[in-house]
Amino acid sequence: MHKLVSACASNATRSVWTKIRGHKFWEVDCQMNSDAFFKSNFRMKRKSFKKLCDMLKGLERKNTNYRKAITLEKRVAIALYALGSSAEYRTIANMFGIGKSTVCTILIEFCHELWRCLWPLYLNKFPMNEIQLREYLNGFESLGFPQVLGAIDGCHIEVHPPAEDAVDYHNYKGWYSMVLLALVDARQVFT
């Protein structure tokens, strides 16, 4: 048995510490193909993508002596692809030439950075002081809904989008719309 263990142990040594992976999808396909190809994969135009990358500079990583960092643009692309498709991490990892755990890490970092950067621009009007929060909570509690801050609902608003973007507005009901989400307090006032 001793010989078997030592034989297995000697076969288990690794000659390299990283797996060689292809980088064709992002480095070639996304750069060489049309804007329609880009939009169909990332659910946004290249111009919007570049603007998003400019906003999320906190995702940028530096090269080390051991390996090159994944570029900011590629990190954003990985996160957008993961959020905009039903693909598994394994599939995304193979497409972008990275590991599954790296896809997961990038997605989590992207969501944290997106929240950090966009919260002040879009959600800073939400009442966050304790007095207002207590008022909202007490209002719902008096209606028999303890620990509720607001009631949210949505509806489809019919729109007539430009022809090149029409597919983005086509809903499951068979017509073009945008979804309006609204949050109200216990008095049915929009918050």
Image (tube, helix red, strand yellow):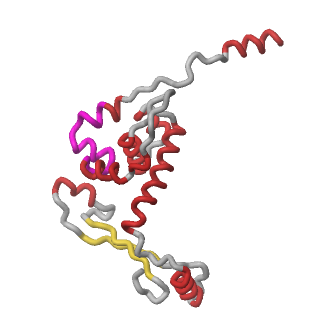
Q: Residue at x 38, y 40 (%)?
A: 74
Place of residue 27 in the rendered image (x, y in percent of width and height, measured from the top left): 33, 32
Relative to 69, does residue 164 appear above or below in the rendering? below
Q: Nearer the viewer, residue 154 or 126?
A: 126
User: Per the image, is 39 magenta?
Assistant: yes
- Where does residue 107 sit, x and y in percent of width and height? 47, 47
Residue for point 33% across, 61% down: 172
Q: Is residue 134 left or right of residue 39?
A: right
In screen coordinates, is 144 left or right of 78? right
The span shown in magenta is 28-46
- Give residue 54's position: percent from left, percent from top: 33, 50
Looking at the image, is 80 positioned above or below residue 15? below
Q: Is residue 74 within the magenta segment?
A: no
Residue in front for this viewpoint, 108 or 144? 108
* Residue situated furthest left in the rendering: 163
Figure quadrant of the C terminus: bottom left
Q: Viewed as shown, does residue 181 lie left or right of 143?
A: left
- Please tell me whether the stretch drawn in magenta is mainly helix, strand or loop: helix
Residue 170, position as x, y percentages in the image: 27, 60
